[in-house]
Image (cartoon, rainbow, N blue to C red):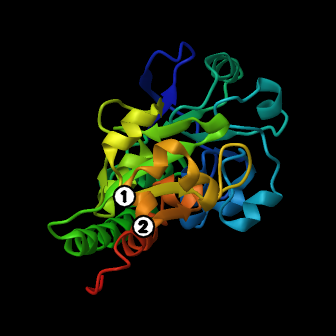
Amino acid sequence: MNIWIKAASCAALTLLPAIVPAEGERNVLSIGGSVTEIVYALGEGDRVIARDTTSSYPAEVEALPDVGYMRALSPEGVLAVAPGLIISEDGAGPPETIAVLEAADIPFVMVPDTYSTEGIVAKILAVGEALDVEDAAAKLAEDIRARLQMAEAAALARAGDAPKRVLFILSTQGGRIMASGRNTAANGIIEMAGGVNVITEFEGYKPLSDEAVTAAAPDVILMMDRSGDHSSDDAELFAMPAIATTPAARTQSVVRMNGLYLLGFGPRTADAVLELTAALYESRDDNI
């Protein structure tokens, strides 16, 4: 069986044979919220010995040891849980940590992460291959594909000829709006839910000027439902000079959803698409 293993140089992914533990052996470190959800959806949760900070679903994973944020892992924290196999979303790091883990001869499976129905299917199949449960993964992947296709079709029907223009705000820390451009999970979920991402000038997440927000003219603001310095309540949000001039401010239209549920692109994404679609088009009379 072949799986993708991250090379020590971290410059590329190389197809190499991996040592996979016997089915049912409990020694997997799962990194990345969607990967962890997939492991549990495959019925292999009892093999997981630890997880990263982004892995918060299902609820029982929070009782497991936490090795830290997936992009800021320490070799000591990972090695302390003695994993026999690490399965991670693409982007885990830093590179120095991955190099140490490679030197320790721990199989490190990096799962591709693209923001589409087929991207989710690919993730499920990759995790299933890493766990040596390909048949279960194929069955789950087909079920999830069918549900996602139904959800996307319903969203397109709901949007019709007037799709909502959506601005995803990652953070309002310090009064600066950090927004989503192209090639992001936020962009992907907006499009799947029948909306239009109003920011297309750049890829990733970047700060926007007040003028750029005004010019974007979003109908709806989309945010993660969280507290702390990176967020703001509705009154604070719509009082921001950049937001106050938008159609979203005039109608007080903001949608907040759990971050992993909204942006995880895992087994629950079809439900997230339906929920976001309903929130975007709640004032319309037609039904999903």
- Within 10 Å of disc 2 (Cα), the crowding (few <14, some 14-19, many 20+) is few
Please name the residue shown 67% across and 24% down the image.
Answer: 105
Q: Secondary structure at mark 1?
A: helix
Q: Position of residue 252 (x, y in %)?
A: 48, 65
Res. 134 in view: no
Please name the residue shown 66% across and 16% down the image.
Answer: 96
Q: Secondary structure at mark 2?
A: helix
Q: Position of residue 16 (x, y in %)?
A: 45, 27
Q: Amino acid at mark 1?
A: Pro
Residue behind mark 2: 251
Give left or right: position of 41 versus 270.
right
Residue 144 is marked as none
Instruction: Check if mark 2's residue and mark 1's residue have beta carbons within 8 Å.
Output: yes
Residue 247 is marked as 1
Give left or right: position of 231 versus 157.
right
Q: Amino acid at mark 2?
A: Thr
Height in image: 12 above or below 217?
A: above
Please name the residue shown 51% across and 43% down the image.
Answer: 241
Among all residues in the image, which is located at the extreme left? 161
Please name the residue shown 80% across and 31% down the image.
Answer: 79
Q: CA distance from mark 2 to mark 1?
A: 6 Å
